[in-house]
Image (cartoon, rainbow, N blue to C red):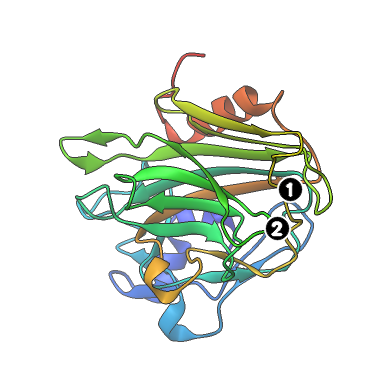
Amino acid sequence: FLAKEVSNGTMEVWVGVGDNGYVVKWYDQSGNDKDAEQTDPNKQPLITNGVNTDSDGNLIKGKPSLLFNASNLKVDSNITGQHFNVFAVVKPSQEDPSTDGYIFDNFTSYGRGLLHDDYYSGRFTLLTDTTSTTPIRRRVQVDVVNNQPTLQLITGIIINTSATSLEGNAFIYNANTGFGSSINTTGSDAIPFQENTFDQYIGAGTSSSNYFSGYISELIIYTGSDQRDNRIAIEANISNQYKIETYPY
C-alpha cells in the first residue's frame, strides 16, 4: 500500500473495516531498498484496527502509525555505518511512561540505537556501541500530559566513530522539550566505538524482554553523514507533518 492508500481508507477496506491488519514489510522510502520485514505472524506490528488508532480510538496526530507490542521488523545489517543519525516519532502506549523497550537496535550486547528506558524513569536513551560490552548511554527527558505519554520527536546522532578511533561524539535531543545530552570521547581514556555490522530491528533490542510497547509513526535514519547542522531543519519539517509542538531553538 502507498502512504495515501493507508490514509484514505483503501487499506482498511481491503483488510476489513474494524479488523486487524499486520505489517509484513515496511518499505524504505529513501530508494535504498533497506526495507524492514517480519515473516513471523506472531511478531508483526499492527497497522490497522479502526485505522491505526491509539488507546482513545484516535489517529496518532491524524497520521497512520505502527503499533509495536512484542513485535519487530528486521532491517539489513550495517545500516548505521560510522556516522549514525536517527529521527524517531514515537509514543509509548501505556499510561506509565517508564515502559522500557528498544525503538531501534540489534540483538547484541553492544547495541547502537534508540531506547525508551524504564530503569532511568522512562527517558529516551541513545545507545552507542563500543568495543566493550557496555554501550555508552545518553538520555533525555520524556513528555507526559495528564500522566499520558505524548507523541515525541527524538533525535540521536553519533559521529566520527570507528573500531580503531579513540574519538567520537554522541548527542541525543528531545525536540519537544529542548532537553539534550552529549558525550565526547577523546584521548587515551576514551572508549573507542565499534562500527555496527549487525542486523538491526525496529521495535526490539537485546532480548525478548526489551520489546518496545507503543506507536512508531516515523523512523528516519541517515548513515555515513553528519546531520548536526541540518538537525533543526529536519526536526521542523517532521514536526510540521505531525503537528508536534517542538522546543523553540
Query: From the image, which quarter does the N terminus lie in?
Result: bottom right
- Vertical side of 242 occupied by 41: above or below: below
Residue 57 occupies quadrant: bottom left
Apparent side of residue 13 relative to residue 196 in the rendered image (left or right): left
Q: Where is residue 80 in the image (x, y as percent from the top left)?
A: 72, 54
**Residue beneath disc 2:** 131
Local SS, label 2 = loop
How far apart marks 1 and 2 lie (CA) works out to: 6 Å
Residue ID at (23%, 55%): 94
Q: Nearer the viewer, residue 116 or 161?
A: 161
Residue type at mark 2 is Thr
* Residue that protrudes farthest toward the left in the picture: 146
The amino acid on which the numbered mark 1 sits, given as a three-letter code, is: Pro
Side of 16 relative to 223 (left or right): left
Query: Which picture quadrant has residue 35?
Result: bottom right
Q: How many discs mark residues in the rendered view?
A: 2
* Frontmost residue, 114 versus 244: 114
Disc 1 packing (10 Å; few <14; some 14–19; many ≥20): many
| Disc 2 packing (10 Å; few <14; some 14–19; many ≥20) | some
The residue sitting at the top extreme is 249
Image coordinates for residue 154, horizontal then vertical, percent: 49, 38
What is the number of the mark on residue 214?
none
Residue 4: x percent and y percent? 54, 52
Residue at left offset 54%, top offset 76%: 24
Q: Earlier in the sequence, mark 1 or mark 2?
A: 2
Residue 64 appears in the rendering:
no
